[in-house]
Amino acid sequence: MGKNREDNVEQREGIRLEYQGKKRETEILKERTANIRRLYGKDNLKRLYFGDNLEVLWHLMEDTAVYGKVELIYIDPPFATKNIFYSRKQKRAYSDELYGSKYIEYMRERLILLRELLSVTGSIYLHLDEKMVFEMKIIMDEIFGVGMYRNLIVRKKCNPKNYTRKTYGNIADFILFYTKTNNYTWNRPVEPLTEESAKEYQYIETETGRRYMKVPIHAAGVRNGETGKEWRGMLPPPGKHWQYTPARLDEMDARGEIYWSKSGNPRRKVYLDEHPGVGVQDIWLEFKDAHNQNVRITGYPTEKNPELIRRIIEASSNPGDLVIDCFAGSGTTLAVADELGRNWIGADNSVVAFSTILYRFENGLEPMGDFVNSQTTCNNGIPLFDGIDEEEEVERKGQSIRDFTIYSVASEETTIREILDAWKATQ
């Protein structure tokens, strides 16, 4: 598209995806009022909302404590599977029946509002599978700008499948990582060196027993400052400069960090025990879905591995920052954010999700098995919040989360009142 677009807000580089029913950004961003009611707790920045997340996002747009102050957004929305998902108790958790252009516009509206909520140093991670990730990559480029794209992370979601049809096994899904600006929060995640990489540290220091490797103390490029001057009677090789000033090299040599060969050639010792680790790459093999691993879970369908969320939160936020997940599901993002000392806001319009989150906040996670042990049900068969069955010795993991606020879209309050009243009675 050319540079002269009709609306300044839409002046972003890249390819546009056109489809029936696509609204202008100015139309999506027209101010509107959301009718939200607080049902429990004092207002703070740990919040759980029940209802349509579009209305919740509009409510947050009007909140000066949230607007422009969100440091991290992680969302795991429906994947346009055309399916209905059920909990381990076979209760209908949510419907994933939107697809095609209707799905794209549904997501686009919410992503535009989420962009507005992000701080200037904020990041967003959108978790999808192959059904819509390519279309949504173009939409994310439109909304955030091509230059704000950081990664398409490939995640191994399950163990290999023994497919009988003529195709490769589908064991991956994807996470699109974008930022609001180029100045974004980034705590570089690292992994330990592999055994193969550690073999490069083949020398052992006689005095200490520490393993090290030898690396040059010069680098490419000619410089006229201190690093281009003579050190210990020698100049850097032609076309190169010292990596450190002569004074710094003297200090390193005094500490025994310079190795001198028999021919008088200096090398820097790099010690294995000081290696910070290798930067995490964009293929993640270790975070399979909770249902595919021997881990504790809630039993909510499409529940994600807490360690996957932990990596994202630690990399793209700091303690005290605000994290949002407006497709909260089982509450994994909220629970991990709370554990890591972040503030959080979650929203979902599924009664089963709401019940699951309350149960999780009170009781933590359970080993593989149903997420409600002995439940009371509503007339419509939806599980109510239930306390711990003291007669059943089930190992649980996770801290109780009680200092948070519960809100509801006004039109949905009666839908969750019975579950909420049952939960309040245990407080």
Image: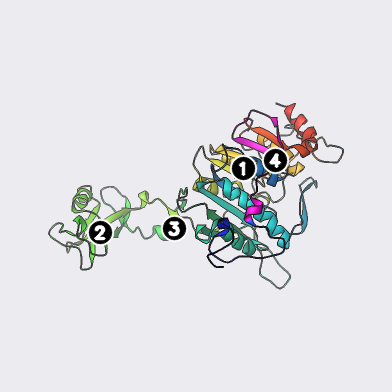
Residue depicted at 66% across the width and 37% down the height? 48
Location of mark 2 (residue): 217
Element under label 1? helix
Q: CA distance from mark 2 to mark 3?
A: 26 Å
Element under label 2? loop
Mark seen at residue 34: 4
Specify which label sits upstream in the sequence, 2 or 4: 4
Q: Nearer the viewer, mark 4 or mark 3?
A: 4
* Vertical placement of residue 306 versus 158, above or below: above
Location of mark 1 (residue): 61
What residue type is disc 2 on?
A: Ile
Q: CA distance from mark 2 to mark 4?
A: 62 Å
Element under label 4? loop
Q: Is 164 inside the magenta-drawn segment?
A: no
Residue span colored magenta:
25-50
Residue 373 at least partly seen: no
Element under label 3? helix
Position of residue 46 measured from the top left corner of the image (x, y, whole percent): 61, 35
Mark seen at residue 69: none
Please rate how many residues cluster around mark 4, counting C-alpha atoms within 10 Å: few if below 14, some from 14 to 19, many from 20: some
What residue type is disc 3 on?
A: Glu
Q: CA distance from mark 4 to mark 3?
A: 55 Å
